[in-house]
Amino acid sequence: MEINNVVVIGSGTMGSGIAAQLCNANIPVTLLDLKTEISQKAKEKILHSRPPLLIDKSKIDNIKIGNIVDNFNVVNEADWIIEAVVEKIDIKQNIYEKIFKSRKKGAIVSSNTSSIPIKILTEKMSKDEKKDFCITHFFNPVRYMSLLEIVKSENNDLNKINSLKFFCENLLGKGTIICNDTPGFLGNRVGVYAMQVAMTEAFKLKLSIEEADSVFGRPMGIPKTGVFGLYDLIGIDLMVDVLKSFIKELPPSDEFQKVAKEIPLVKKLIETGYTGRKGKGGFYRINKTDGNKILEAINLETGEYFVSKKIDIKSDKVDIKKLINRKDKYGEYAWSVISKIIKYASSLVPEITNEFNDIDEAMRLGFNWTKGPFEMLEEIGVKNFFERVDSFENNKFLENLSKSKDENYYGERQKYTDIETLGKIKPKAIKLDKHDSAEIYRFKDFNIIEFTTKANTLDYDSMDCLKKATDKPLIIINESIQFSAGVNLNYIMKFADKGDFKSIEKFIRYFQETCKHLKYCDHPVISAPSGLTLGGGFEVLVQSNFVVSHTNIVVGLVETIVGLVPAGGGCKEMLWRWSQTEEAIKDPDFAPLKVFDIIGYAKTATSPVEAEPLKYLKPDDKKLMNRNCLLPYSRKILEENRDFKSPKECKFNLSGKEVKEKMIKILEKLYNDKVILDHGMEVGKELANVLSGGDTNLGKEISEDELLKLEFNSFMKLIESKKTQERIKHTLQTSKPLIN
Ligand code: NAD
């Protein structure tokens, strides 16, 4: 079965997200709604979406639009028709009737419903029609949430379902899991239960919402929005609708019912317009007093708002075992929540799926959890878990495990895919070294580095790992979404606060030395980025010999925002890339001025298509839609480069003072126009000094090391300045830039 033409009916949040992802995969798609104006508006929304739904905005017109009356004939030509209209059974069924009258024989018809069972959606369909109908449950935002659940019924032609899975996996880049027709399928059944448990236990154990979010967040390997933050993000009213649907669909005996009961505070919030971020606020709100924006958090007992308190439970790493063993209320809360999630998820096997592994993967792909419930159980340890857990009647999975006591019950990872992913390789690889900031794996004849810090920020230890791992061909890749958000600024500031600039010098020198070593060592080094690839993260990438990039990356050199200049070779490499262009051959100042513009404005790209014109990525870097394919493709490159020879060092000819003056002129204009202030001027001047080559002229050849020295000197000068330190502190506290 080939899919060359798709129609999406319903151009709301999901329909437009799905159409955009089809457009990203270069599949012709038509988006229909009740009126053409609605789909036209949807197209505009796609174009201006943040984060962007399109990889390449110039392709927006590849999404055709229309309405379901005048343009329904497009259905005749489609290989796949996706219904994504409002969650109303009769409306959906009417649409199917119309589709089946017009569709090409054998074309697949699917619904994006999140709660209506297939048996209800298909109740009016003929046997032949049922054969080609399934649910394709995408997650929002479609480009960024990997999970796609394909829900099948006993009527389906399995070959067709499998080829749809193949298409969605390989062309749309989705982590595609086939599941049974049960309420909430896999992701939402466990994910929404987990949210409800996290919420009800916070009430029960009298935790503040900030406390609950600080536990049910990064320490548990869950996104930092936590539970109350996530409620606000999704919309408190929408969550109530989701819960109503679960209450209706699930039997009264289901444990879900216990945590889905209406909570008076939630009811009050909705009644008063506190529906979350889209409304006046929710559990959290922003209070604007005297022009200041203050984050407030609700008191779960009184319903009053107070200035939100930052809670630091001093657990920066995902360590479930340590977390549940804490002898404080956070440990008690964590155990209570985690054990309930494990009990519930395991009670659903085999009803919702035969593969418990699929539940873990659905949580990873659909909710960005680092570990699913069964992996959490594995980490806690079977013996430990049963020593502590209370009852688990009628839970066949736990009953069996309590008898077998098999600590190695877990087996293979990511069973839903045939792709040889990083997740599958890791358990088979040898862990070479245990570091704090990265993990080195040896697999066959190559090494893998996976960064392990928050947002995979880099420090001395990360550099140590990179260096050590170059004794073999090396692939730098992460299971967590971000490649690296750059150098760990907290780490830098710890030294700066003590006035210990010698330690910062030592780190920067090592950073430079390591990145340069990546480029010139005897073995090939491949970076396989996805997500944030910023600052120092980009400097690692740009000095790797090959790049295999996911199409969802945010890449750029953003150091100037925090009052610094790239000092790990970023300026040098960007200069080199731009000096290879035709314009640069004609005009020696072209490259430095171009790079001055890119780094000075801290320009970022949100996809490879945006990254190439800035030369953050090269045309021959590989770009892939499916993250799971990054490792196999990197291995293919290693295979093809067995006789790898490291590149020759670059030499630069820069005009020094001449081009620096041009840059200063640009800065002066920005300063006079008040686009930059005093410190912006200082940072700009340092950048100008680096990119002009310092004290040089066109007749002089300068080496990479000389450029690195300029980067180093400017970085150190800036980090020692109070105003740069103020910028860094401000950004660390608020995630926003400080203009000073
Ligand atoms: P939405 O309200 O944003 O969009 C629905 C669209 O359907 C609207 O543009 C509406 O004009 C259109 N529509 C209504 N009746 C129609 C008809 N007869 N013909 C053509 N168009 C019609 O809804 P949504 O959030 O995009 O949800 C769509 C589906 O996806 C629902 O089944 C929902 O349960 C499911 N879903 C939603 C999410 C989510 O996060 N929003 C996630 C997964 C699944």
Image (cartoon, rainbow, N blue to C red):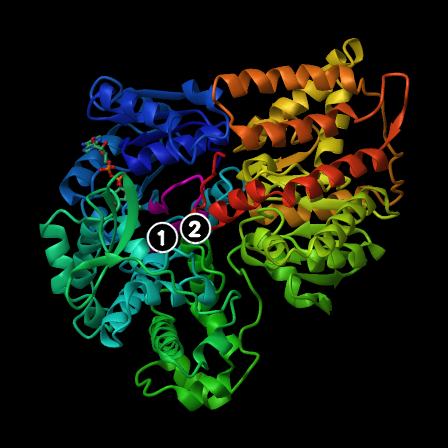
- Judging depth in this view, the residue of 548 and 679 nearest the camera is 679
Image side of residue 520 versus residue 81, left or right:
right
Would you call the spot at circle 1 few (<14 residues within 10 Å), some (14-19), or many (20 or more)?
many
- The amino acid pointed to by label 1 is Lys
**Residues at marks 2 and 1, CA–CA distance in whole angstroms:** 8 Å
- Examine the rendered structure and indicate whether residue 105 appears above or below residue 286: above
- Judging depth in this view, the residue of 603 and 79 nearest the camera is 603
Location of mark 2 (residue): 158
Residue at 78% x, 49% y is 509
Whichever of labels 2 and 1 marks the residue nearer the N terminus, that label is 1
- Judging depth in this view, the residue of 54 and 183 nearest the camera is 54
SS class of the residue under badge 1? loop
- Examine the rendered structure and indicate whether residue 570 appears above or below residue 363: above
Residue at 39% x, 68% y is 215
SS class of the residue under badge 2? helix
- Judging depth in this view, the residue of 194 and 415 nearest the camera is 194
Would you call the spot at circle 2 few (<14 residues within 10 Å), some (14-19), or many (20 or more)?
some
Bounds of the magenta segment: 134-154
Q: Looking at the image, in which quadrant does ligand 1 appear?
A: top left
How many marks are shown on the rendered structure?
2
Residue at 68% x, 31% y is 686
Q: Are marks 2 and 1 in contact (CB under 8 Å)?
A: yes
Q: Is residue 450 magenta?
A: no
Mark number, residue 152: 1
- Examine the rendered structure and indicate whether residue 324 appears above or below residue 537: below
Q: Is residue 141 magenta?
A: yes
